[in-house]
Amino acid sequence: MKRLIFCLILIPCQLFAAEADDDYLLSLVRIDEMVDVVREEGLSEYQGMPFDFFGSDFGNIWTDGLDRVFNEIELTNSIEQDFLNVIGETPRADIVSFLESDAWQVAVDYELKGRIAMLDPGVSDAAMTAYWNSFEKNTRRIQDITDLIETGDLINSNVVGAMNSMYEFNLGMISEGLDIGMSEDDILVQIWSEEDSLRFDISEWIYSFLLLAYDPLETDLLQEQIEFFKTSEGKRFNRALIESFDRAYSRISFELGAAIAILAREQVL
């Protein structure tokens, strides 16, 4: 009986400790703040989508739909859960130590501000011009950014994520009965045919964004990031973050496709 009582007391304490560890880890990653930016980007990028398809903005109907698709609470909860599932419960000391450092926290501050700034077409164009100038001069910062991009496999992972999102968008339209004139195999062929141009655009954007966002970041902090992402724990953290957001973007794309199909059906009706 004493052993049973001990187990009943111990298990809830262990569960509480695990939850506390998860909460602290997530507070350091700052997924909730990232989701706020994802929402701003989504509302900006997709507000005009109905006009592109139908020549009408559909007013509050589409705005309300976007609010539901980019619901911060639901997105944050799903991404955080996916992140925890991928990263697992194995020792996290090295990951937490990095996330507590300026190499992560200051960099995230700059990235969040940079993502919002890039929503301005003028800022985005200027950032791309600055990137190509830096590329031609092969500056030290462009070399460091290249090292970070290659270490984190940022271009390949974003290309795969974008292609998955394109596929899910089409599936979303099909799910609501919209005849898009292509089978699922045809969709895949079409998407793969765009890989090269997609890779170029994504590469240009990532370089431009990181050069803009990290312009005030001290070189030693950038080097700390690069060195961390070369480690096994860094790769594990990077994979968890990328996969959790990729899943969210795929869900968002599917829901957007479905919403467009519903509007198309209402147009016919």
Image (cartoon, helix red, strand yellow):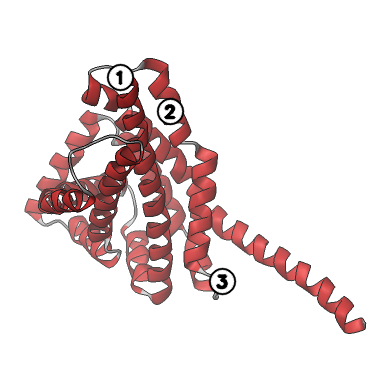
Instruction: Please name the residue that numbered disc 2 is placed on.
Output: 65
State the image coordinates of residue 187 (x, y, percent, origin top left). 19, 48
Question: Residue placed at 34% from the left, 17% from the top?
Answer: 58
Looking at the image, which residue sits at the far left?
136
Mark 1 or mark 2: whose residue is earlier in sequence: 2
- Tell me whether the residue at label 3 lies in contact with that at label 2, contact meaning CB atoms closer than 8 angstroms: no
Q: Quadrant of residue 256?
A: top left
- Structural crowding at the residue carrying mark 1, measured as other residues with C-alpha within 10 Å and reported as few (<14), some (14–19) or many (≥20): few
Q: Nearer the viewer, residue 114 or 13?
A: 13
Q: Vertically, is 125 above or below 267?
A: below
Dot 3 amino acid type:
Glu
Q: Vertically, is 194 above or below 22?
A: above
Secondary element under disc 3, as helix, strand or loop, is loop
- Structural crowding at the residue carrying mark 3, measured as other residues with C-alpha within 10 Å and reported as few (<14), some (14–19) or many (≥20): few
Q: CA distance from mark 3 to mark 2?
A: 36 Å
Mark in front: 1 vs 2: 1
Secondary element under disc 2, as helix, strand or loop, is helix
Instruction: Please name the residue that numbered disc 3 is placed on.
Output: 89
Q: Nearer the viewer, residue 174 or 116?
A: 174
State the image coordinates of residue 8 (x, y, percent, origin top left). 83, 73
Residue 183 in the figure: left or right of residue 95? left
Mark in front: 3 vs 2: 2
Question: Residue placed at 14% from the left, 48% from the top?
Answer: 190
Instruction: Please name the residue that numbered disc 1 is placed on.
Output: 267
Q: Nearer the viewer, residue 19 or 223?
A: 19
